[in-house]
Amino acid sequence: MSLAAPSCYIKYLDCRNTAMLVHCPFFPPEHCRIRKVNDEVYYITSTQQFGFYKPKAETKGDSLDSVRKSFNRLKALINCNYDSPDQIKYITLTYAENMTDNSQLRKDLQPFLRKMHRMYGDFEYLYVKEQQGCGAWHIHMVLFFPCPAPYMPNNEDDHPVRDAWSHGFVNVKGFSNDINNLGNYLCAYLTDDKAESKKGGRLMNYESGIRLYNCSRGVKRPVSSCMTYEQYLDFVSDEENLLISDSETSIVFDSGQQHSIKRELYAKI
């Protein structure tokens, strides 16, 4: 691996099981550079100019970039909330009927979660809502247990999770200790179209203008801090920090200046 050159600012995002390092050639602004005037116009404090917000997405395809960013946040959130993959259960909840009412989801989830807590004890959770092409909703849910997750029968004759849901088909999946980036692994289930062998093919199924995921209050959040270059060298030299991927993007300021931003994702093994 080639080390990143010294930069002005290194952001360290600690996701407990993974870590994201962002190398930036400038310091982030101390004050807000943009002030909202109204729903259509914003004011740029540095240039004393006005700009116009992009129109809100009207279709799923219009918001793909926003959906991708939401999934990146979701990956970090998942990686923050387990000590071992066997503490997690991944559940898919579907409806037997063609249920198209988004507001009905929360009403159906509340009694389901109460029943699950009675059966399986304490856990935190997050869930993602997905709408199929026909308009029907279904739910992908991740349960985080404080110890190895309890056994949940997953067959036709014995399926307590399906009985607790009572609205349709349910699938339960567990995980083993050979996964070092569970957030990425789970999000691949949500975004890749395996039938078409298309990576990210299911992103179009996520509705624009609707919150992509929700979680319980006890879910842990990533912790952000600033890292010096000397600390960065110590971090990458530690054999327990395994580089998973790196990428480099360019941003162009209004002045025409172009800057390169490097991102490195590590698994903490």
Image (cartoon, rainbow, N blue to C red):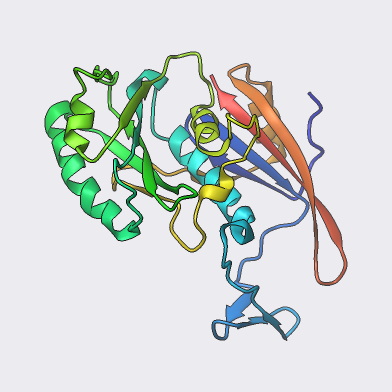
Q: Quadrant of residue 193?
A: top right
Quarter of the image for the N terminus: give it. Answer: top right
Foreground pick, 224 / 131: 131
Q: Residue 9, how many percent across, how many down?
A: 70, 49
Residue at image position (63%, 21%) is 242
Q: Is residue 238 left or right of residue 161?
A: right
Residue at image position (28%, 21%) is 149
Residue at image position (57%, 86%) is 37
Q: Residue 147, how many percent across, how many down?
A: 28, 21
Q: Is residue 226 left or right of residue 86?
A: right
Q: Quadrant of residue 196?
A: top right
Q: Is residue 132 left or right of residue 123?
A: right
Determine whether 217 is above or below 60 in the image: above
Q: Residue furthest left?
A: 118
Foreground pick, 229 / 151: 151
Q: Is residue 117 left or right of residue 261?
A: left
Foreground pick, 110 / 61: 61
Q: Residue 77, how many percent across, how many down?
A: 45, 41
Whether residue 84 is visible, yes or no, is no
Whether residue 230 is visible, yes or no, is yes
Determine whether 223 is above or below 267 in the image: below
Residue at image position (65%, 35%) is 199
Q: Quadrant of residue 158?
A: top left
Q: Total of numbered circles in the picture?
A: 0
Q: Residue 140, how many percent across, how many down?
A: 39, 39
